[in-house]
Amino acid sequence: MLLQPESEGRITLDPKSAEAGSGLRTDPGYLTSEADLGRLIAGVRRAEALFAGPSLAAHTSGPTGVYPGPVDDARLAEAIRAGAETLYHPVGTGRMGEDPDSVTDPRLRVRGVAGLRVVDASVMPRITRGHTHAPTVAIVERAAELIPEDARQPAAT
């Protein structure tokens, strides 16, 4: 499992689609970074070595790898690509940041849409190294502070 993959997906809208929601395209971009695939190959190789080692060998029966017998990295990469799936909740589709490509600003306001905020895991710029629940609660708690603050401020011109 990769705790912080480099691969990035995309959610795009088809501008030719007139029906709401019908033009939404999701490409998770799984394993588009060669570094991610390399880390998974290294992880499988480490697991194979651990299972074949003296501490675990007595608890295994037969080959301990993905395939029986030795397998080169290209074949292992095929197996990983065929069997990999997401584990944690995806984040970043409404990425928060100060750059113009971010969807939300640091106060969780959607750029270019007055009065709209995103208050969920999608504002996280990168996935956390654990479950997304606690960071999402922190985002919600911060939003609960920001919304009344912004309501007291005069509108920006």
Image (cartoon, rainbow, N blue to C red):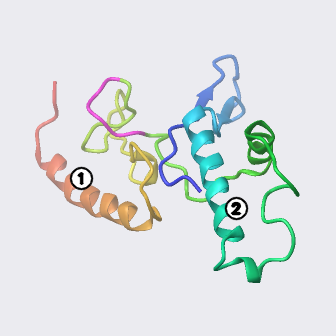
Q: Position of residue 157 (x, y in %)?
A: 16, 24
The residue pinned by badge 2 equals: 48
* Element at label 2: helix
Q: Is residue 131 left or right of residue 25?
A: left
Which residue: 63% across, 18% down? 15
Q: Quadrant of residue 11?
A: top right
Which residue: 68% across, 32% down? 25
**Relative vertical location of residue 15 with respect to residue 33 in this rendering, above or below:** above
Q: Position of residue 81 (x, y in %)?
A: 75, 43
Q: Quadrant of residue 34?
A: top right
The residue pinned by badge 1 equals: 147
Name which of mark 2 and mark 1 comes first in the sequence: 2
Q: In this view, does 151 lie to the left or right of 55?
A: left
Q: Decide whether the magenta segment is chiefly helix, strand or loop.
A: loop
Q: Quick check: marks 2 and 1 in contact, CB under 8 Å?
A: no
Amino acid of disc 2: Glu
Magenta part of the protein: which range?
A: 95-100
